[in-house]
């Protein structure tokens, strides 16, 4: 019998961002971006609970006003993953549970993506999972679009900003674009955060390479679904057009 562990969603939301300060509070259809992410994640039936993890009182105040569960974390975390772990510990999540690190800048994310991400944890051997989707050669050339190469078990061999695998004979249909959402067993998340920054992680500036360098397998689920991340202020308009204002729930403010 397969045993599905309990799953929790945590949305790291930092105010300071080099490309877009105050990004979680950016307004989309009259509501802050974090609210949209929270609403989407809350529609995933596998999640026991969803919470926002922030280091900024402006975000905390806005979340409380909109009845979004929020956890104040330290402001010196090197990454969102470290913030997610601190929040998971404060939420008293059990050791064999699964923690989903939900990107706070994906307000158009589909809840089904989280369900797909969680599915591999029916296998007790799964430690970490992430998503990827097929991309064309032109998209693969962009270093901001991370590529992933898989083994036969659909575990990641390598992630890179470069084109991998390199199409030496001109074959182009073989690229998998990584989607940066992760699920970890809590024990693995603790292990990941305790490890020093890896050598190739520091070169590519991709923290998931720390897992590969330490032989912690990352199971990759291929999805047809797509989402649009908000990196810069000009991305807001693109996301606004993707979100149907008529389907939004009415905010419950306190």
Image: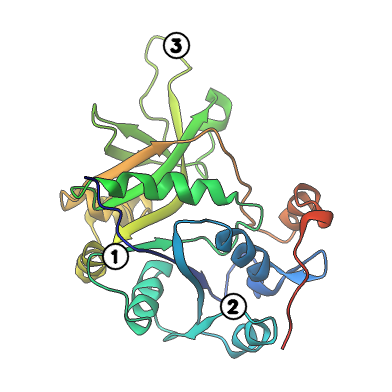
- Percent across and percent down for residue 227 are 61, 46
| Tag in front: 2 or 3 | 2
Q: Residues within 10 Å of mark 2 (few under 14, many from 20)?
A: some
Residue position marked by numbered label 2 in the rendering: 15
Q: Residues within 10 Å of mark 1 (few under 14, many from 20)?
A: some
Element at label 3: loop
Location of the C terminus by quadrant is: bottom right
Q: Is residue 76 left or right of residue 39?
A: left
Depth check: give the residue in front, 153 or 136. Answer: 153
Q: Of label 2 and label 3, which has the lower sequence position?
A: 2
| Tag in front: 3 or 1 | 1
> How far separated are the C-alphas under marks 2 and 3?
43 Å
- Percent across and percent down for residue 42 are 57, 63
**Up-down relation of residue 171 to residue 47 (above or below):** above
Residue position marked by numbered label 3 in the rendering: 170
Element at label 2: loop
Q: Of label 3 and label 1, which has the lower sequence position?
A: 1
Q: Is residue 121 left or right of residue 67?
A: left
- Percent across and percent down for residue 31 are 76, 71
- Percent across and percent down for residue 47 are 45, 62
């Amino acid at each position: 019998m397969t045993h599905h562990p309990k799953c929790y969603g945590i949305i790291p939301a930092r105010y300071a961002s080099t490309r877009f300060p105050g990004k979680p509070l950016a307004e989309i259809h009259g509501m802050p971006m974090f609210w949209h992410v929270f609403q989407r994640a809350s529609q995933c039936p596998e999640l026991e609970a969803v919470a926002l993890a922030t280091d900024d009182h402006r975000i905390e105040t806005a979340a409380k006003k909109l009845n979004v569960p929020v956890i104040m974390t330290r402001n010196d975390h090197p990454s969102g993953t470290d913030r997610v772990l601190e929040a998971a510990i404060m939420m008293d999540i059990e050791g064999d549970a699964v923690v989903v690190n939900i990107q706070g800048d994906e307000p158009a994310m589909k809840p089904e993506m989280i369900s797909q991400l969680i599915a591999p944890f029916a296998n007790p051997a799964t430690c970490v999972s992430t998503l990827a989707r097929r991309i064309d050669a032109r998209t693969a050339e962009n270093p901001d679009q991370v590529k992933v190469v898989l083994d036969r078990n659909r575990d990641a061999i390598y992630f890179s900003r470069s084109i991998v695998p390199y199409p030496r004979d001109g074959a182009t249909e073989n690229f998998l674009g990584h989607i940066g959402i992760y699920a970890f067993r809590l024990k693995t998340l603790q292990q990941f955060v305790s490890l020093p920054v890896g050598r190739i992680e520091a070169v590519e500036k991709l923290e998931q390479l720390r897992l590969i360098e330490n032989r912690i397998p990352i199971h990759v689920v291929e999805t047809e679904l797509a989402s649009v991340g908000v990196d810069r202020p000009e991305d807001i308009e693109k996301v606004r057009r993707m979100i149907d204002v008529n389907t939004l729930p009415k905010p419950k403010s306190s």
